[in-house]
Image: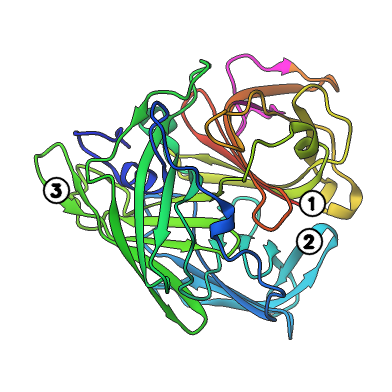
């Protein structure tokens, strides 16, 4: 299973997480600034291509590409290594920013939620399909200063065995062809205390470089930091970073060269966003209106469940935001009030980071389980989990990524975009 970062066996989640994390919580650190990013383009093009990956799994060995063509309402997605033929079709727009993906016969074959030119969340199938989170970086842009990014590992790993969220800083040269990642820190799952659970540090130098290349309107930043494992051997871990102009982040790390006995996952990926410029007002965050997905993963069985959800646009209680699923997954029908996010205190050192958050969702005895289900406000049984919430403002509106954990360490991940 995933091990903690440090001078012991470092799984790919360890490495990747450290790549995305920033300075340790104890010392002075450079403040990242969103002003260093190019920001949202004036208008996204009619064709936008994204790079990402489904939730972490021992069977996933490739990055995915996703292309949305709004000039003719078509889509294409699939593994970039050509291990499977690409899936293509047309799409129809729904209320709330969703797209219904249609197959060649006109039947629904998936859903997607896109911020054109920045990021997309794709469900390539029914509710038992893992989500694909993907980001568009069309060119090798430069950034000013040292920009901080916050992230969480994508679902599919066991939280109890290692780090689950973190931060990193990035800077570039004048033309964006050379990147430098530095001051990385990663953290274990929250433990209910007033500070993040013990910080883990990577087994490779705290600063390392990457090279950006662009082709056909898509760019990635590649690096290969060395990581030290418990068999007293260091392995290079090829890594790809995709960062949108406004600050959405996707990163993936390959463990193909590491013996399976040390780490069974071929890849580990993280999803994240740049740090906001200042501390956020929870009232402003929680009263906004959001749509997105809740993805639940069971690492031991390799099963997933994803649901269309909406939150906000309603009075809040303290730091809690009410939301839930939609009847028949139709965003126009109005969300059910069967879920709750409680943000808790914001980390004073990391704007938009809530590491004492809670997620309450309906109990169903299947993917959603807990030792003692309790009645919720509407009388139905519900489970409440510890969680980490990350809130960014990459395009002037809020984006929320929240990762919760059941008693067995399985992740439940919310991705929400303000409407």
Q: How was the colour assigned to the protein in this rendering?
A: rainbow
At 19% from the left and 34% from the top, the residue drawn is 7
Which range of residues does the magenta coloring cover?
Answer: 356-374
At 51% from the left and 50% from the top, the residue drawn is 271
The answer to the question of whether label 3 and label 2 lie on touching residues, with beta carbons closer than 8 A, is no
Label 1: state its secondary structure. Answer: helix
Q: Is residue 167 magenta?
A: no
- Mark 1 = which residue? 329
At 75% from the left and 39% from the top, the residue drawn is 285
Looking at the rendered image, the disc whose residue lies closer to the viewer, 3 or 1, is 3
Q: Position of residue 386 (x, y in %)?
A: 57, 24
At 37% from the left and 73% from the top, the residue drawn is 177
Is the residue marked by circle 1 packed among few (<14), some (14-19), or many (20+) residues within 10 Å? some
- Mark 3 = which residue? 234
* Residue 97, label in figure: 2
Above-or-below relation of 168 to 381? below
Looking at the rendered image, the disc whose residue lies closer to the viewer, 1 or 2, is 2
Q: Does the magenta stretch include residue 369?
A: yes
């Amino acid at each position: 299973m995933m091990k903690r970062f440090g001078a012991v066996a470092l799984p790919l989640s360890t490495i990747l997480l450290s790549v995305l994390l920033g300075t340790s919580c104890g010392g002075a650190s450079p403040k990242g600034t969103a002003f260093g990013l190019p920001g949202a383009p004036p208008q996204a093009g009619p064709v936008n291509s994204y790079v990402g990956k489904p939730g972490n799994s021992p069977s996933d060995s490739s990055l995915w590409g996703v292309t949305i063509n709004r000039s003719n309402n078509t889509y294409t997605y699939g593994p970039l290594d050509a291990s499977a033929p690409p899936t293509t079709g047309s799409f129809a727009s729904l209320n709330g920013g969703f797209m219904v993906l249609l197959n060649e016969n006109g039947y629904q074959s998936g859903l997607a939620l896109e911020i054109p030119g920045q990021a997309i969340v794709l469900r390539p199938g029914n509710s038992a399909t893992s989500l694909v989170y993907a980001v568009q970086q069309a060119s090798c842009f430069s950034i000013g200063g040292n920009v901080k990014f916050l992230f969480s590992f994508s679902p599919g790993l066991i939280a109890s065995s290692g780090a689950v969220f973190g931060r990193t800083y990035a800077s570039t040269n004048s033309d964006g062809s050379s990147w430098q990642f530095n001051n990385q820190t990663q953290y274990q799952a929250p433990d209910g205390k007033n500070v993040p659970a013990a910080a883990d540090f990577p087994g490779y130098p705290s600063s390392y470089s990457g090279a950006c290349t662009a082709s056909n309107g898509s760019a990635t930043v590649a690096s290969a930091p060395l990581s030290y494992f418990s068999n007293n051997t260091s392995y290079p871990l090829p890594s790809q970073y995709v960062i949108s102009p406004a600050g959405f982040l996707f990163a993936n790390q390959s463990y193909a060269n590491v013996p399976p006995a040390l780490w069974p996952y071929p890849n580990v990926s993280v999803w994240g966003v740049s740090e906001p410029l200042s501390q956020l007002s929870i009232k402003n965050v929680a009263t906004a209106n959001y749509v997105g997905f809740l993805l639940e993963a069971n690492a031991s069985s390799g099963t997933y469940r994803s649901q269309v959800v909406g939150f906000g646009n309603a009075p809040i209680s303290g730091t809690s935001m009410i939301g839930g699923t939609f009847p028949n997954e139709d965003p126009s029908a109005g969300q059910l009030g069967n879920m709750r996010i409680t943000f808790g205190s914001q980390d004073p050192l990391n704007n938009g980071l809530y590491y004492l958050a809670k997620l309450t969702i309906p109990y169903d005895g299947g993917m959603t389980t807990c030792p003692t289900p309790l009645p919720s406000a509407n009388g139905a049984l519900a489970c409440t989990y510890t969680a980490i919430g990350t809130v960014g403002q990459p395009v002037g509106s809020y984006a929320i990524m929240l990762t919760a954990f059941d008693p067995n360490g399985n992740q439940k991940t919310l991705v929400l975009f303000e409407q």
